[in-house]
Image (cartoon, rainbow, N blue to C red):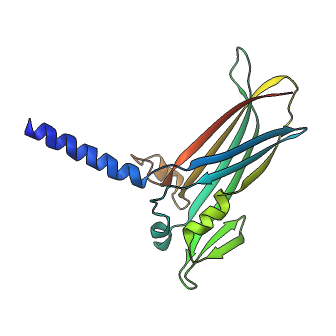
Amino acid sequence: MKSLVLSFLFFFYANFVFASDFDSFILTYQSVQPVNNAINLELVLDKPKDNQIEKVLKKGIILKLSVNNFVYEKRLLLPSKLISQLELVYYLRYDPLTRQYTIMQEAQTIARNIDANFLLDVIIKNISISIPTKLIKNNDYTLTTKIQLSQSSNQPYIKNNLFFNSDNIIQPLEIVYDFKYK
């Protein structure tokens, strides 16, 4: 009985500690506005309070923040059809010479600062995306958005062999929004 209680406490404590270090992004605001040939999406996110972003960046690891958007057309009997897809990618890295953190998008530096959490907030507090797609009136659609902060340096063959998804720094967030275009 004593070993059962100790093992329960061990697993409970271990899961509690790891769960607090691996929380997900928090959605605070979402706006989806279908227009003629696009879907305008606005997101405001918060990150977990206890994260390891600065520690990981100072080790020389480049982080990749990806925002993947998928638009599906719903069908009655057949599976939903993917009609549009858009990916927005940012890279966060640490420069040891200047002791500053950098956000890059498509090989262009967006911002520099000495605080990595501040730079991440600059990105996730105002995500505005226009997803080009053709919408047909009176049809049902699903917009799926996946937000992920992971290491960008992992090779594709290593990802398949990881027991846990250890390249994620913050747990990925998936948002599903169903709407009817009128």
Give the tally of numbered discs. 0
Q: Quadrant of residue 78?
A: top right
Query: Which sits in the foreground, 175 or 146?
Result: 175
Quarter of the rendering occupied by the N terminus: top left
Up the image or down, 160 lies above or below 59; here it is above
Judge left or right: residue 174 versus residue 31.
left
Judge left or right: residue 170 versus residue 107.
left
Residue at 62% of width from left, 48% of height from top? 28
Up the image or down, 103 lies above or below 44; here it is below
Up the image or down, 71 lies above or below 131; here it is above
Residue at 66% of width from left, 52% of height from top? 44
Up the image or down, 92 lies above or below 146; here it is below
Query: Which sits in the foreground, 127 or 38?
Result: 127
Judge left or right: residue 110 versus residue 47.
right
Residue 85: horizontal and vertical position, in percent?
74, 42
Point out the residue furthest to the top here. 77
Point out the residue furthest to the right here. 36
Point out the residue furthest to the left here. 2
Quarter of the rendering occupied by the C terminus: top right
Residue at 50% of width from left, 53% of height from top? 170
Query: Which sits in the foreground, 43 or 106?
Result: 43
Judge left or right: residue 134 versus residue 7.
right
Residue 60: horizontal and vertical position, in percent?
50, 72
Residue at 49% of width from left, 69% of height from top? 54
Residue 12: horizontal and vertical position, in percent?
27, 44
Point out the residue furthest to the front here. 28
Residue 158: horizontal and vertical position, in percent?
46, 52
Query: Which sits in the foreground, 144 or 151?
Result: 144
